[in-house]
Image (cartoon, rainbow, N blue to C red):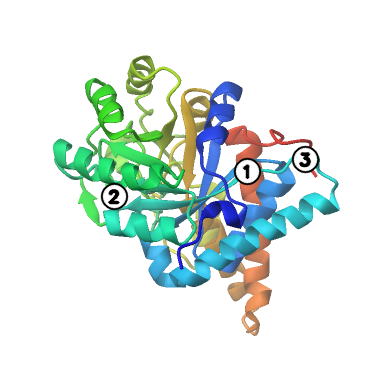
Amino acid sequence: MPVSYKDLGLDNTRAMFRKAFEGQYAVPAYNFNNMEQLQAIVTACAETRSPVILQISSGARKYADQTLLRYMAEGAVKMVRGMERAHAADQAIPITLHLDHGDTFELAKSCIESGFSSVMIDGSHHPYEENIRLTKEVVAYARERDVTVEGELGILAGIEDKVQAAQSTYTQPEEVVDFVGRTGVDSLAISIGTSHGAYKFKPEQCTRDERGILVPPPLRFDILEEVEKKLPGFPIVLHGASSVIQDAVAMINKYGGAMKDAIGVPEEQLRQAAKSAVCKINIDTDGRMVMTAAVRKVFVESPAEFDPRKYLGPARTALIEMYKRKNREVLGSAGRYGKEF
Ligand code: G3H
Ligand code: 13P
Ligand code: ZN
């Protein structure tokens, strides 16, 4: 039986992006695959009074089971509303359940039918006209159900879904008006130099600071500005926006890991982007790394430990702190729906 997101207490992205645009901040889109990640994301966002987009990739859907994930998201909404009642909050934070990097109409349809309030259809690796055709098809289905759709133009370097792109293809500002007009998307992901994963830039693209840490080339804010001029007031999305927190890299390496030259997007640049038309910032890798660092520490320091709560618990605590800091210092989304708890 298809279910509407409206019956699950979820929101689409329309009103939250309008408010983010006007308030010059970005809504966090955090990926989750398991209970501890989801608990950390919603706890951090409820406590900081930040809107939140819970993001599920097709890989996450396969890993955790699509039915279970839908009930987990419903449970997360109920958990947040309980926290709001306990703190007598006078506003509720909006919560979106979003498909990340949907690659087929069937996948987007299946997510919408199971209660997603927003979907991404990523046709960026197709030829332009095919991207338009596929995106339009999803928009037509989503619109009838008041579900919002994110499209993408330009290819991020690294692993874009199942497509390996060695080189990024920046979004061409001359295409955006035609793409948005013909597809009817509600938001647009663009490529301005970010990429997915923990190795966003090759050492040869970077310089090194006095500690030997790589300093990446700056994002192409000139392309973002051109896009903003062509689509005034339109919500833009940044994928591949983990900063690859260097403390997490160091902790992973200290406790037996091997993540040499892992490098992300500097947080000052993400803060700058959040003040622009960028209304949604996607972060997955930072969560994975913070979790891994905390688990590795327990394994090394307490090798006799075998209760998963004893290592997933500290990982969840570390994630909550990281997401809260991102909301406050990077996205600027904290405190937008009342005072922090
Ligand atoms: O953009 C990709 C996200 O980080 C999801 O990654 O496909 O490994 O779940 P995944
Ligand atoms: P990161 O790999 O930089 O966290 O990007 C995540 C993302 O874009 C999910 O769609
Ligand atoms: Zn992405």
Amino acid on which disc 1 is placed: Pro
For residue 171, which quarter of the picture? top left
Left or right of 33 in this view: 166: left
For this rendering, which residue is in front, 204 or 99?
A: 99
Q: Between disc 2 and disc 3, whose residue precedes?
A: 2
Left or right of 177 in this view: 318: right
Cα distance between the residues tagged 2 and 1: 28 Å
Query: Element under label 3?
Result: loop
* 99 shown above or below 306: above
Amino acid on which disc 3 is placed: Glu
Mark 1 or 3: the one toward you = 1
Q: Ligand 1 falls in which quarter?
A: bottom left
Q: Between disc 1 and disc 3, whose residue precedes?
A: 1
- Residue 9: x and y, percent? 62, 52
For residue 194, which quarter of the picture? top left
Amino acid on which disc 2 is placed: Glu
Tell whether label 3 touches label 2 (CB within 8 Å): no
* Residue that numbered label 1 is attached to: 94
Query: Which quarter shows the C terminus?
Result: top right
Mark 3 Cβ inside 8 Å of ligand 2 = no
- Residue 280: x and y, percent? 48, 37
Query: Element under label 2?
Result: strand
* Residue that numbered label 3 is attached to: 340
For residue 11, which quarter of the picture? top right
* Residue that numbered label 2 is attached to: 160
Left or right of 33 in this view: 329: right
For this rendering, which residue is in front, 200 or 172?
A: 172
- Residue 39: x and y, percent? 64, 61
Mark 2 Cβ inside 8 Å of ligand 3 = yes
Tell me the number on the disc at residue 338. Answer: none
